[in-house]
Amino acid sequence: MSNTTSSPRPQIEVYYQSERSDVLDFVEYGIEEEGVPWHVESMQRDDLLMVAHEAADDSRLGIGIAIGDGNPSRTILQHERMPEDQPVFDVSSPTLVQARLLGANSARLAKRTPLKRIPE
Amino acid sequence: MKYIAGIDIGNSSTEVGIIRHDQESWRFVASSLFQTTGLKGTTENIPGIKRALERGVENAGIEVKDLDLLLLNEAAPVIGDVAMETITETIITESTMIGHDPSTPGGVGIGTGTIVDISGSQQTHSKDDDIIFRVPSAVDFADVAAIINEWAEQGYDIQGAILQKDDAVLVSNRCEIDIPIVDEVTEIDEVPLGQPAAIEVASSGQTIDTLSNPYGIATLFELTAEETQKIIPVARALVGNKSGVVIKTPEGDVEERSIPAGSLTVTGEDGSKSTVDTEDGAQAIREAIRNRRPLKDVTGESGTNIGGMLNRARTEMGEITNQNPNSIQIRDILAVDTVVPQAVKGAVAGEYRMENAVALASMVKTNRLPMEQIAEELEQEIAIDVHIQGIEASMAVLGSLTTPGTDFPIAILDIGGGSTDAAYMNEHKEIESIHLAGAGDLVTMLIDSELGLEDRKTAEEIKKHPAAKVETLFSIRHEDGTVDFLETAVDPELFGKVVLLKNDDKMEPINTDHSLEEIRSTRREAKEKVFVTNSERALRQITPSLNIRHLPFVVMVGRSALDFEIPEMISNTLAEYGIVCGSGNIREEQGPRNAVATGLVLSHIDGGSFLDFELPDGLSTSITEKVATDE
């Protein structure tokens, strides 16, 4: 279902380090259920905070998600106007439920609807 | 040198005004306020009085012992109480409706069919049957889509799905057929299998129009006229939803009924009586009250909420004044129609409906006896002469006359928490005053119940502060549509929410699903219903001609005059009568505060330098006599 071709339309940019993971799938489900377009791309870079900010900068919605290496993989939700070291959400090893909520919240940021609480 | 302090014990705050006499003239030197301790008009007020005095003398650069005389207002305790009665109720004896409103349903349109469990076998169903799947949370969205696709491929007519989890869009995106899907139905087991149902999902930005229309439901289920009558409450409960489900059960029955809410008996001073049913609504009650003015008493039917509420007010007042509760009389009632969200009885997914209700404020008033106790105790505690000076409303009029641009005849309005007070001084300087039921507390109750908050504190905050919507991480939109951009990002917790703007620029989220517009209109309508209605009611009663148009000046004083929108609302209403109305500015510096405390002092110093006319005897007699004997 994901849209993997780069296009100039408003969409959430989801960048992941090296390989696809379950976390990425669930982030996508979260965005999809909220009905917001997104785009996934692999991004080989060490600094995940930097990747997240780049994703937000590249997004026409100003909203980016970076998913790190490892399983589970650190996931960062970022907005283009936030400082690089102050992302909107930064979850070090999200569960699949949390990953889906991070996806849902990125879409809710775009739709301007209240965010869901991400349980610890 | 001589110092005199005027002390006004109000329902919520105790205010002090201090005046000094030197070189043949009087000059106000300090004002202060402290929150009233205890119920107004009881000796529990003394700690609050002392704190307010201490603050006042500090502002004046003196000590409490430097004061020569304290003047207290003759504050008769007034107890306002509020209560509400729901007078309609929707009951569904069989599960017939899901008025659920998930934020992200799937698909669009209407489907009708028999409810079938998604894990059931195809063999038990005929291809001639239309099917609506019931999906418990255990089934993964990908599997749901696969099953729907498989059944559809086999030739079954799948018309829709009801999901427990928040997966509707995910399922819809993976289905090869386009069907309406409702999700987030937590009590999925309550959805009865094997029954005919209809499901509707509106396109984005729209609300459903078939299931919210009784004839729409009648068409789908081929109902008779009699059956259509019965599903009217179901249709109405679905109005405004983005999605809905209606299930027809064999013995399904829905009724809408009136709850017996009890009756009120209004007795006039002339002994005439009338009885009115609460379920006849607020207007009938208001008329009964108006027709029996002046009121002697109001009683409620025993064994009903109304009866209980009026008895509670009597008992409370009886305890305070050491009187028999049965001898306490209710002097006024304000009734207001309202609607409150109530859970629909027998519904399956926590549906609610806006049911009709009547909200009431009642008021009892008693004699001045307790004030003498306060004066006596205070005198003993601080060893300064204490006098009770004139009644509160008269003092408020005197104080209000120090507002630049006013003259008498003049009327003042003082809207507090429990009562709405008004006073009028005519061209002969005669003052008349009244206390009416219905003020801030009733507004708080209306906001609380209409928004379904069940939290008086939040309702009180909504009443007092303007709201805004957090639109982005860096901007908020105010009620008037203007946008403020922020330096730093808001807490993600606040994002997308409606917040209250507190005085120190703090944003506090309101945890409801209501939009900014709903919150604003609920707040404003509650204030209109109580404050504007009561202002007109009060002014009409104190105007000698009973015609508000004959009032030249109306000055608003007290805490409500500091509200961010009440003065404007009342001014706008009174402007229609050609009246100059605005918030007071006591002594050209106190705003609407300190009117009574200032009036107390002015009445004692007999004219002073603040009013350019001589006070009528009636206002200063009691104190002049006392001072004469003291000297």
Image (cartoon, coloured by chain):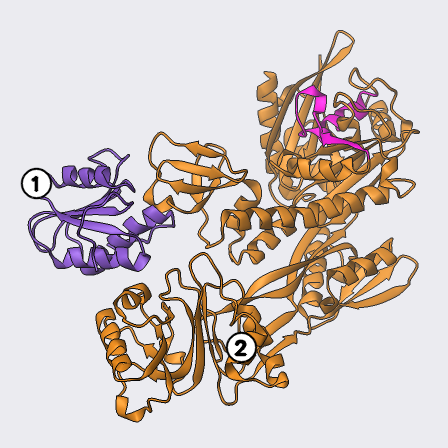
Chain colours: A purple, B orange
SS under mark 2:
helix
Residues shaded magenta: B578-606
Q: Measuring 27% from the left and 86% from the top, which residue is drawn there?
A: B120
Relative height, residue A41 to residue B104 (above, below): above
Q: Which residue in the structure is indicated by mark 2?
A: B217
Camera-nearest label, 1 or 2: 2
Q: Which residue in the structure is indicated by mark 1?
A: A45
Reply yes or no: does residue B587 show up in magenta.
Answer: yes
Q: Measuring 65% from the left and 52% from the top, which residue is drawn there?
A: B442
Q: Are marks 1 and 2 on the same chain?
A: no
Looking at the rendering, in which quadrant would you find the C terminus of chain A?
A: bottom left
Return the residue nearer the eye: B107 or B68: B107
SS under mark 1:
loop
Amino acid type of the residue tagged 2 in the rendering: Ile
Question: How far separated are the C-alphas under marks 1 and 2?
Answer: 58 Å
CA neighbours of label 2 inside 10 A, class few (<14), some (14 to 19), many (20+): many
Instruction: Count all numbered tags in the image, as a single digit.
Output: 2
